[in-house]
Image (cartoon, rainbow, N blue to C red):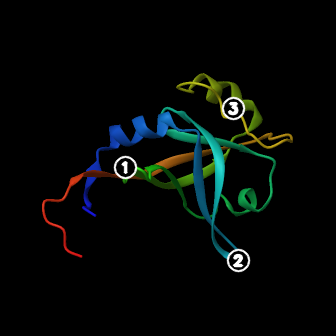
Amino acid sequence: MPRRTLESLERDECFTLLGQERVGRLVYQDDQGPAAVPVIYALAGEDIVFRSEGGSKIQALGSQGVAFEVDRIDEATHSGWSVLVRGSSQEVEIEHLPELVRRFDGDVPLPWKKGVHKIWVVITPKTVTGRRLADFASEDIF
């Protein structure tokens, strides 16, 4: 089977791709080690915003950096892309919510899980990298 080459994505294209999706994986460290959990998110400029009821992910945020990953894979065509954001996270104080809501590029994040998701978290990117499976390689080894 022929294989594809990897193409690095520019920062602007990474944010375009992030804006097309709604589910990403929050990666953080807690007292048991690294963890990755899916969250429903939205973009507010270049900030990534999600909501939560609380729990271990909220307790672990703030003191250390976080990562956020989104991808789209098409197994039938063996194509896809991945964007990785590394940065810091901060819980949004209630008095700053109206200002944050005005910054959304589209809809606010609406959690799929039942419950009251009153904790809003903003991830501020420090680095943004992306890769796409591009053209088929001219030579294939193994």
Hey, what amino acid is under mark 1?
A: Thr
Any mark on residue 5, and which?
none
Frontmost of labels 3 and 2 is 2
**Residue 27 on image: x %, y %:** 58, 61
Q: CA distance from mark 1 to mark 3?
A: 44 Å
Q: Residue furthest left?
A: 138
Residue found farthest to the front: 1
Q: Looking at the picture, does residue 41 appear above or below residue 27?
A: above
Q: Could you tell me which residue is drawn at 18 percent across and 59 percent down? A: 137
State whether residue 32 is above or below residue 76. below
Q: Which residue is mark 1?
A: 77
Q: Amino acid at mark 3?
A: His
Along the line of sight, the residue nearer the viewer: 141 or 22: 141
The answer to whether 48 appears left or right of 60 in the picture is left
Residue for badge 3: 96
For label 2, the residue is 32
| Left or right: 58 in relation to 123 | right
Asked whether disc 3 touches disc 2, contact meaning CB atoms under 8 Å apart, the reply is no
Decide: few, some or many residues near mark 3? Use Cα within 10 Å; few <14, some 14-19, many ≥20.
Answer: few
The disc labelled 2 sits on which kind of residue? Answer: Gln
- Marked residue nearer the N-terminal end (3 or 2): 2
Describe the element under mark 1 as helix, strand or loop.
loop
